[in-house]
Image (cartoon, rainbow, N blue to C red):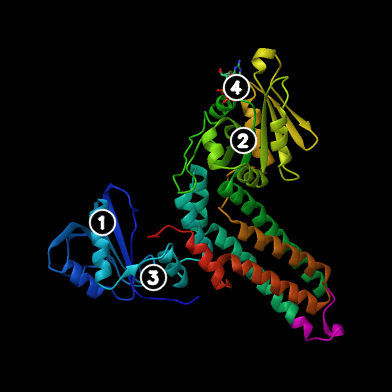
Amino acid sequence: MQQTTDTIAAIATGLARGGVGIVRISGANLTKLMDALLGQILVPRVATYLSFRDEESEVLDSGLAIYFPSPHSYTGEDVLELHGHGGIVVINLLLQRCIQLGARIAQPGEFTKRAFLNNKIDLIQAESIADLIDASSKQAVRSANRSLQGYFSTAIQQVLASLIELRITVEAAIDFPEEDLPSSMLEKHRQSCQSIGTEIESIFKQSMQGAILRNGAQVVLVGQPNVGKSSLLNALTQDEVALVSEIPGTTRDINRQEICLEGVPFHLFDTAGLRYSDDVVERMGIEKTKQFIAIADVALIILEAQANLNELDQQFLSYLPAGVTKIFVLNKIDLTGEPPRLENKGADYLVYLSAKTGAGIDLLRTCLLKVMGWQSEANVFIARERHIQSLKGAKLCLERALNQAGQWELMAEELRLAQELISQITGEYSADDLLGDIFSHFCIGK
Ligand code: GDP
């Protein structure tokens, strides 16, 4: 990826009214800009109270300024932070002044991209910064922090070190005639292959948990009015701190809700809203509904105990992709006197509960988390689909290498591929378009 060092600037605190607003600037050399804007070159890493001035030396705003000279800064370049007042106009005037002094407005994620390109952080850590900002639960914050602190990267580096060690001896074996190699060598290589495979498997499992925590589950809700959907959602989230992110595109309307169970976000889409609200029917056609249903992980079908689904509900269910788990919730058992219970029905589940009394709600919580494969948050580091795919690919390479033990060239090739896949996770061998895609999803100023 082409490395640029021109000066970039952005409002790091977002465009919102608040007590303090921060403009962040990064570039190869900020002394000229600092002199023009602040009338002095700041002492490094010391917060100085002063005035920010326009081209006629008029005061634009007053506040704190901090200078982080290269390389001891977030991006690795010279960084200047201006902490002014958080009014939308005043902070924009400050940004415009920086542009006038030669900076340009930063792209989304450009500060973090520079940190990555200057080797301040690896790709896993860069991604975890975005995940930390977007985290919608305490658990997601904790696991993003674990990735940011380097737990995931260290595990990857350890696998890489073992892989490189094995590759060196396997590649060396290629050049020797079979009879010159000690007989124990083959067994040693087999064992190394196996133990690296086990290491990758264990990281893969942890990453799967991290991906669940990050992505959560898409849940389609099917049920007639008055079966108790709202009551059920309230009961489910009663002990949870429901922290819903206000990221654009995730705002809720009457069809969508988000609940968090043990920190795992469940994105609920209520098909009933479509049938009973003209407004929504206007805005979202049946085709859009089908698209949503097609990406569902779980269908939550709510019935009053002993009632049946109507034709429209059946139709919605028929749009579900094959293999989606269905959880049938039989609500209002307090009226029928049945005990709360969880039953298997083939690959699907039946949960008998009462949203009103709370009986059986725990069973539904457990069931939802279980069908998503969630185990626990302990030691999870946040992970993404691309990490999962690389680990999956590397696992297959190791299996093939093990099967080809003794055929040194083939084995060496599989190990080389495994190393490449694992290296992509930390960004050592990542294509430009992948990096572009990752950083474009950041917010501006980060
Ligand atoms: P929705 O239209 O599907 O969202 O249903 P609501 O949650 O608004 O509930 C409809 C009615 O059923 C309300 O009067 C609730 O108090 C009642 N209700 C919901 N769950 C239960 C339950 O488990 N037992 C009993 N007896 N009533 C319930």
Question: Is residue 5 highlighted in magenta?
Answer: no
Q: Is 182 covered by the magenta stretch?
A: yes
Closer to the camera in the image, 200 or 28: 28
Residue 199 image point, x, y percent: 68, 60
- Which residue ends up furthest to the right in the rendered image? 179
The verdict on label 4 being within 8 Å of ligand 1 is yes
- Residue tagged by mark 4? 226
Q: CA distance from mark 2 to mark 4?
A: 14 Å
User: Of the residues tagged 2 and 3, which is closer to the observer?
Assistant: 2
Classify mark 1: helix, strand or loop: helix
Q: Which mark is residue 76?
A: 3
Bounds of the magenta segment? 172-184
Residue type at tag 4 = Asn
Q: Hey, what amino acid is under mark 1?
A: Ile
Question: Which mark identifies residue 190?
Answer: none
Q: Label 1: which residue?
A: 91
Q: Are marks 2 and 1 in contact (CB under 8 Å)?
A: no
